[in-house]
Amino acid sequence: MTENQTTLLKAVNFEGIGLHCGKPAKLTIEPAPIGYGIILESDGARIPADADFVSETARGVTLSNNGVSVKTVEHALSALRGLGVDNALLKIEGEEVPVLDGSAWLYVEAIEAAGLLQYDKAAAVWEYPQERSFVFRHKNSSYSVRSSDHLHLDVSLSFPNTAIGTQEVGFTFNGNDAYAREVAKS
């Protein structure tokens, strides 16, 4: 089944502090038209929420364009993607997106309360075109990719000799509300 493009029915606002800079941060997520994508706007610059604009990944994701950067975008972007939002304008005031409770949950709640509008145009779908699997390793991380009818993630992290210790969890996304129920509060 092909899903259609989606946006918010109305804007949502967030205020708080930046996790790493400790300074005030504001974010407004506004509806956007068909084909707009997810665009961040800060200090007059427009930054597509696209891997090509990732400039830093240490202790958070930073997106940059035309000399302007926005830090710690991962929770807001996770909420949008997890809820199937394809088109939105994120207006940011400050160096970072507000940390809120440290998860994507408060973003999810606000976006769900605003409601979603489904357009009459199919959303882009990324499909892994091959039936083979592979493993990508980077420093102490590894990522395994293999064909499946649904997105399934097995996540393991290990911080020996800390309160975090070793943690493992698995998620399968079958087009239901699994993201909001199981992932957003992480």
Image (spheres, helix red, strand yellow):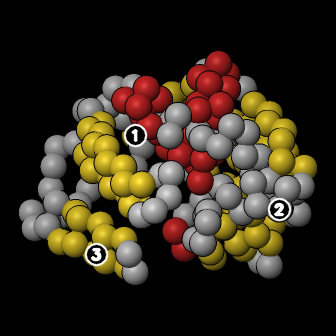
Residue 151 makes an appearance in the image: no
Q: Which mark is residue 142?
A: none
Q: Report the mark closest to the observer, 1 or 2.
A: 2
- Tell me where residue 53 sits by quadrant: bottom right
Helix, strand or loop at disc 1?
strand
Q: Report the mark closest to the observer, 3 or 1.
A: 3
Q: Which mark is residue 136?
A: 3
What amino acid is found at the position of numbered circle 2 in the picture?
Cys
Q: Report the mark closest to the observer, 3 or 2.
A: 2
Q: Position of residue 153 (x, y in %)?
A: 29, 49
Q: Which residue does the image show at 50% across and 58% down from the upper left?
A: 162
Q: Which residue is mark 1?
A: 122
**In the image, farthest residue toward the front:** 161
What amino acid is found at the position of numbered circle 3 in the picture?
Phe
Mark 3 and mark 2: Cα distance apart in space: 32 Å
Q: Which residue is mark 2?
A: 21
Dot 3 or dot 1, earlier in sequence = 1
- Tell me where residue 8 sits by quadrant: top right
Residue 148 makes an appearance in the image: yes
Does residue 30 sit above or below 160 in this rendering? Answer: above
Judged left or right of residue 168, residue 59 is right
Mark 1 and mark 2: Cα distance apart in space: 39 Å
Judged left or right of residue 158, residue 67 is right
